[in-house]
Amino acid sequence: TALKASFAPKLQPRNMSTNQLQPQASFKVAVLGAAGGIGQPLSLLIKMSPLISALHLYDIADVKGVAADLSHCNTPSHVLDFTGQDQLANCLKGVDVVVIPAGVPRKPGMTRDDLFNVNANIVKTLVEAVADNAPDAFIHIISNPVNSTVPIAAEVLKQKGVYDPKKLFGVTTLDVVRANTFVAQKKNLKLIDVDVPVIGGHAGITILPLLSKTRPLVTFTDEEVKELTVRIQNAGTEVVEAKAGAGSATLSMAYAAARFVESSLRALDGDGDVYECSFVQSELTELPFFASRVKLGKKGVEAVISSELQGLTEYESKALEALKAELKASIEKGVTFVKKKA
Ligand code: NAD
Ligand code: LMR
């Protein structure tokens, strides 16, 4: 079908013979925040991609050791390290995809919005450098609060005169990964077959799984819908509490972000059948940014898929209306932050 989801990223080299791998690898990817809890396993996972020729690792903390370590994996990409603001421009030159997991994570009792004061500045500074040095790159924003950091990135790019809304993505893949896992467990389905679109944003009630649009077709009782929706919305907090002060999701996030990188590279490589959910500039609702399934192509978002917002259940319609006020406020907070600094 036209909406075939790309839930099985090809992270393994297709052929283990090195000389046959070389011709496939052509894209350059930068990870900003590469020494962190997400940055390290994410860099490992994307080091396995046969589509990448160069992996640029940047952090304000020393990233030399991470790069030396990863560089011994016999997969095609060359690994280069860049530590500190002075090396950021060089890190970004010529890259096709920039992934940004830089910033502080939550501790128990905090909301994602509590991270705004620190992470807003980090994302602003990094995206300014992306605008100056890699204005054509796909930008994947992982740093929280995503509902605000993506609008921050958009405003920065606008101010620099290089904003291409088709190439700016808030990474919400982890919400889809979680929804797929929890639904498969609950309904005893084969994991690889399950695909649940998740729309809205990436915080609390703004995360809205559309369980009625689950593939394969599956029916839920009202209780199951409520229980699964709340679990998916609180899954980040579930991990924050289990880690008890040591941070938030890093490994599942790295897995999800690697999937989104791989999908982006496949799209850049000309695969015409790549779909992912992402928080992007959107006209699906009255909100300027909204997460939904999008079709990815060589130039970024090729289409925002509207069909999944039609025929929602009453529960989903109400939840969609209920999330709009919070999401709108978070978007405006991000926009105002950049405008005030101008
Ligand atoms: P972490 O503290 O383990 O790592 C963050 C890294 O960013 C550190 O290595 C730090 O040195 C680096 N850093 C800080 N300021 C920087 C700057 N100006 N430039 C470059 N690097 C900088 O945190 P983590 O667990 O990896 O989480 C990172 C972010 O990702 C947090 O904001 C977290 O909330 C967010 N997150 C988002 C999702 C999502 O679904 N979008 C999921 C999990 C975590
Ligand atoms: C998540 O969903 O795991 C992340 O947004 C991190 C967090 O703070 O919950």
Image (cartoon, rainbow, N blue to C red):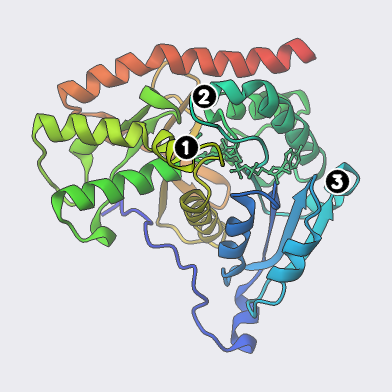
Ligand 2 near label 1 (Cβ, under 8 Å)? yes
The disc, 1 or 2, on the residue closer to the chain's N-terminal end is 2
Which three-letter amino acid code belongs to the residue tagged 2? Met
**x then y, percent, for residue 181:** 29, 51
Q: Residue 253 at what x, y percent from top left?
A: 50, 48
Q: Is residue 163 visible?
A: yes
- Image point 60% across, 64% down: which residue? 44
Q: Secondary structure at mark 1?
A: helix
Instruction: Identify residue for label 2.
Output: 110
Q: Where does the image place residue 196, in percent across and percent down from the top left?
A: 28, 44
Q: CA distance from mark 1 to mark 2?
A: 9 Å
Q: Is mark 2 within 8 Å of ligand 2?
A: yes
* 153 over 214 or under it: above or below: above
Above or below, 115 against 244 in this view is above
Residue drawn at x 44%, y 28% is 201
Q: Earlier in the sequence, mark 3 or mark 2?
A: 3
Nearer the observer: mark 3 or 2; the answer is 2
Tell me whether the residue at label 3 lies in contact with that at label 2, contact meaning CB atoms closer than 8 angstroms.
no
The image quadrant that residue 325 belongs to is: top left
Check residue 157 in the rendering and tell me which mark sits there, or answer none: none
CA distance for labels 3 and 2: 28 Å
The amino acid marked with disc number 1 is: Val
Picture residue at 42% right of the left edge, 47% below the top: 276
Is 174 on the left or on the right of 27, as rendered?
Answer: left
Q: Amino acid at mark 3?
A: Gly
User: Which residue is the extreme one toward the right?
Assistant: 86
Q: Residues within 10 Å of mark 1 (few under 14, many from 20)?
A: many
According to the picture, the residue beneath numbered tag 1 turns out to be: 240
Quarter placement of the N terminus: bottom left
Q: Which residue is more in the foreground, 70 or 97?
A: 70
Residue 84 is tagged as 3
